[in-house]
C-alpha cells in the first residue's frame, strides 16, 4: 500500500480522492527535526513551503518515490538531488494561477487609487484633507501593463488586464508568442482571441506604466537599480512571485527618489520577517504571501496533487 505523509496540509477533497484510490494518508504534521525518523516509513511526502526536504532527509528515505509541493515554488526542496535519486517532483502550477493573478491586479488597484493608505487613515482622519490628498489617482484603461514571466499566472493576469482595456506587453525568454482567449460571461459562443508576442525585458521596462513579476525564484534579483532606472518615472511594480526577485534596497531608494510611484509586494526576501521599512512605506501595498490562498485555489491544489500522485502509481497501490 502507498503511504502518504501530508505534512503541510491538504484540502478535504484531495485527501478523499487519495483515500478512495486505496492510499493511506496521514495528515498529522511531523516537526522538521523528527522527519528523519518518520519519513522513511512513507512513499510520498506532500509539503507546502514550511517543510524542508533537503539532501540529508532524502538520503534517509530510500523508499521515497514522490515529493509533492502544493504550489509552484520549490525553494524548500533539493529538486535536482531528489531527481538524481529517481524521486518524482510534483507541483501544482495550474491550480492557483487565477488566484495569484487576481491578487496582482488587486495590488494594482490599491496603488492606482491609494486604497492601501486611505483604508488605514479614514478612521480618525480628516475626511476633507484625505479627499484632497488622494484625488490624483489614475484609471487603468489605456495604461500599459508589463508582465515579466508569461506562464500560466502571467497569462491569466493578461486576460484580466485586457478585459479592462489595458495594453499588455509580455517578456518571457521561453515563450515567444501565444494566443489568449477571453470568454464572455455566460456565453459559449462569443470569445475574444488576442495574439501576444514576447518582448525583451528592457523594452517592457521602458514602455510600461505597471510591471508585474511572475518568475521563479532566482539566484540574484531580476530587478535592481539598473533595471529600475530604465522604467518610466512614476511607474508601479508588483511582485507576487518570489522574494528576492526585486532588490529591496533599490526599490526603496527608487520610491524615495520618485523614480517609482509605488510597489505591491506579496513576496519578500526575508520571510516570515520582512523589512519593517517595506511594510510601513506609504507607497507600498503589502500582503503576507497569500497569492494562492483562496478557498478555490486550495481546493484545486489538493485535487491536482491527488490526480498527479494517482497517475504516477497507476494501479500499484
Image: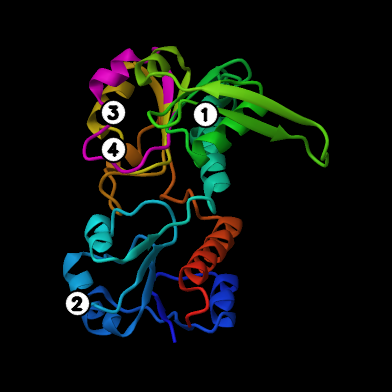
Q: Are marks 3 and 4 in contact (CB under 8 Å)?
A: yes
On the image, numbered disc 1 is attached to which residue? 114
Is label 1 in contact with label 4 (beta carbons under 8 Å)? no
All told, the count of numbered labels is 4
Q: Please provide the residue range marked out in magenta.
A: 212-236
Q: Residue furthest left?
A: 56
| Residue 174 within the magenta-colored segment of the rendering | no
Determine whether, in the image, residue 56 is placed left or right of residue 185: left
Task: Tell me if residue 235 is in the magenta stretch.
Answer: yes
Classify mark 1: helix, strand or loop.
loop
Circle 3 sits on which residue?
252
Secondary structure mostly seen in magenta is loop
Q: Is residue 286 visible?
A: yes
Residue occupied by mark 4: 277
Mark sitting earlier along the chain (2/3)? 2
Which of the marked residues, 2 or 1, is nearer the chain's N terminus?
Answer: 2
- Mark 2 and mark 3: span between their CA atoms? 43 Å
Residue designated by label 2: 60
Residue 138: where, in percent of width, then height?
A: 57, 19
Amino acid at each position: 500500500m502507498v503511504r502518504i505523509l501530508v505534512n503541510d496540509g491538504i484540502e478535504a477533497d484531495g485527501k478523499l480522492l487519495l483515500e478512495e484510490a486505496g492510499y493511506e494518508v496521514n495528515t498529522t504534521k511531523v516537526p522538521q527535526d523528527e522527519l528523519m525518523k518518520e519519513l522513511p516509513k512513507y512513499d510520498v511526502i506532500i509539503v507546502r513551503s514550511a517543510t524542508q526536504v533537503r539532501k540529508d532527509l532524502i538520503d534517509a528515505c530510500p523508499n521515497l518515490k514522490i515529493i509533492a509541493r502544493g504550489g509552484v515554488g520549490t525553494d524548500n526542496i533539493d529538486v535536482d538531488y531528489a531527481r538524481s535519486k529517481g524521486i518524482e517532483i510534483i507541483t501544482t502550477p495550474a491550480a492557483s494561477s487565477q488566484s495569484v493573478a487576481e491578487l496582482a491586479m488587486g495590488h494594482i488597484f490599491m496603488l492606482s487609487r491609494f486604497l492601501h493608505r486611505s483604508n488605514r487613515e479614514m478612521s480618525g482622519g480628516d475626511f476633507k484633507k484625505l479627499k484632497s490628498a488622494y484625488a490624483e489617482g489614475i484609471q487603468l484603461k489605456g495604461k500599459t501593463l508589463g508582465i515579466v514571466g508569461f506562464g500560466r499566472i502571467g497569462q491569466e493576469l493578461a486576460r484580466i488586464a485586457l478585459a479592462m482595456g489595458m495594453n499588455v506587453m509580455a517578456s518571457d525568454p521561453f515563450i515567444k508568442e501565444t494566443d489568449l482567449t477571453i470568454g464572455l460571461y455566460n456565453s459559449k459562443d462569443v470569445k475574444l482571441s488576442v495574439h501576444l508576442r514576447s518582448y525583451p525585458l528592457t523594452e517592457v521596462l521602458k514602455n510600461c506604466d505597471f510591471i508585474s513579476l511572475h518568475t521563479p525564484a532566482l539566484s540574484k534579483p531580476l530587478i535592481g537599480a539598473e533595471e529600475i532606472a530604465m522604467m518610466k518615472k512614476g511607474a508601479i511594480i508588483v511582485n507576487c512571485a518570489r522574494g528576492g526577485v526585486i532588490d529591496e534596497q533599490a526599490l526603496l531608494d527608487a520610491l524615495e527618489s520618485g523614480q517609482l510611484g509605488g510597489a505591491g509586494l506579496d513576496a519578500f526576501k526575508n520571510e516570515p520577517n520582512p523589512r519593517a521599512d517595506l511594510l510601513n512605506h506609504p507607497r507600498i501595498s503589502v500582503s503576507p504571501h497569500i497569492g494562492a490562498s483562496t478557498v478555490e485555489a486550495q481546493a484545486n491544489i489538493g485535487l491536482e496533487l491527488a490526480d498527479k500522485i494517482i497517475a504516477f502509481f497507476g494501479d500499484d497501490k
